[in-house]
Image (cartoon, helix red, strand yellow):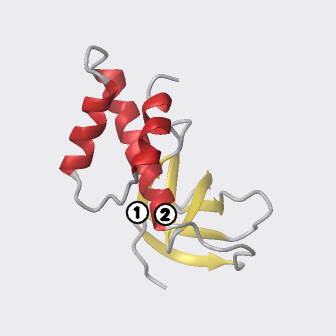
Amino acid sequence: MENKVNFITSEKGKPLVLLNLHKYRLIRERKDGMKKWLCTKKTCYASILTNGEYVHETINEHNHTENSQQSIERQVLREACKRKSNDTICVRPIKIIRTELMGNDHFEIEHRDVRPIRKAMYD
């Protein structure tokens, strides 16, 4: 099974893997260079082994539904805005959000999502 994974950042700045709308957190890196990732839902024991950017092995099945595309895009946008706000503290939050949204056409963010993103930038 050779699926390519996407890497995103958690709210705490930790690496996450995104595969088929499921998020995985890093558990450990083995001596042979393989990394083991566990599902971010606490009651789910699904895990994957990756070798670089590719899935080497899938262990167990998920016991929950997958995340929505919109919630993942919201998290990616929030973390990108947080990083930008740390670099440039003199720029208004809404301007940072607008530049991120204009730079990426694939975001399906609603108006009600902007306020929590703006509040999260300076937490």
Residue that lies at the very extreme toward the front in this rendered image: 111
Residue 30 visible somewhere in the drawing: no
Instruction: Label 1: state its secondary structure.
Output: strand
The image position of residue 104, as x and y in percent, is 23, 54
User: Residue beneath label 2, please?
Assistant: 18
Q: Residues within 10 Å of mark 1 (few under 14, many from 20)?
A: few
Residue 60 occupies quadrant: bottom right
Q: Is residue 52 above or below residue 94?
A: below
| Residue type, mark 1 in image | Asn
Residue drawn at 50 percent across, 37 percent down = 116
Residue drawn at 32 percent across, 58 percent down = 107
Asked if disc 1 and disc 2 are in contact, CB closer than 8 Å, the reply is yes
User: Residue beneath label 1, please?
Assistant: 6
Residue drawn at 76 percent across, 57 percent down = 42
Of marks 1 and 2, which one's residue comes earlier in the chain? Answer: 1
Residue that lies at the very extreme toward the right in this rendered image: 43
**Residue situated in front as seen by the camera: 9 or 35:** 9
Instruction: Label 2: state its secondary structure.
Output: strand
| Residue type, mark 2 in image | Leu
Using residue 103 as the reference point, say whether residue 88 is left or right of it. Answer: right
Mark 1 to mark 2 CA distance (whole Å): 5 Å
Q: Is residue 47 above or below residue 2?
A: above
Q: Residues within 10 Å of mark 2 (few under 14, many from 20)?
A: some
Q: Is residue 17 above or below residue 86?
A: below
